[in-house]
Amino acid sequence: MNIVLIGMRGSWKSSVGKVLAQRLGFGLRETDSMVEEKTGQPIADFVAAQGWDAFREKEMEAVAHAAREERVVISTGGGVILRRENIEALKARGFIVFLYAPVGELIARITHGSRKRPLLTNAETFEEDMQRTWKEREPLYRAAADVVVNTVQKDAQSVAGEVFRLLREKNVI
């Protein structure tokens, strides 16, 4: 059984994934890192050169590879839920956890961190891009998730602890 973390940019999938994998004694697969390794370039550069459709194809390959493994925490890119094939592959051997935070909080988290992320829509500002993307994706995250974990006013350690507790309650681990 794998544990799959989904959510928007800034939902702490990578940070929680590292803590959770260590706590479970599982491996960690980050699909965005897998794509960067495969393409030999940062996602922003790949998207600028090849476009989002090409990135989604590479992402689908990374998801399929990670989903075939056992006993891994899979930290996905925010758009993984845009392709039904990704969710089907992840659900085949995985339990999906949606790391939730409202869009305003996500914007604040990213604003305080790295903003070297390509826009996902034709919006003129990062904030508008995040608003549009959130509106499109939130229902998809909820539909794909086995559980939703609220990350508001929590750090990665406490979120990982909450995910761990839920996994035990639901007899996943």
Image: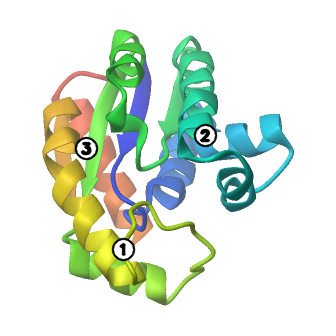
Q: CA distance from mark 2 to mark 3?
A: 34 Å
Asked if one can make out residue 128 in the rendered structure from this viewpoint, the answer is yes
At x 41%, y 80%, the residue is 126
Q: Position of residue 45 (x, y in %)?
A: 74, 59
User: Residue tagged by mark 2?
Assistant: 55
At x 36%, y 44%, the residue is 6
Q: Position of residue 11 (x, y in %)?
A: 37, 63
At x 60%, y 80%, the residue is 114
Looking at the image, is mark 2 or mark 3 earlier in the sequence?
Answer: 2
Looking at the image, is mark 2 or mark 1 earlier in the sequence?
Answer: 2
Depth order, front residue of 78/152: 78
* Whether residue 156 is situated above or below residue 169 in the rendered picture: below
Q: CA distance from mark 2 to mark 1?
A: 19 Å
Category of crowding for the residue at label 3, using alpha-carbon neighbours closer than 10 angstroms: few (below 14), some (14–19), many (at least 20): few
Element class at badge 1:
loop
Residue type, numbered disc 1: Ala
Looking at the image, is mark 3 or mark 1 earlier in the sequence?
Answer: 1
Residue type, numbered disc 3: Arg
Element class at badge 2:
helix
User: Residue tagged by mark 1?
Assistant: 123
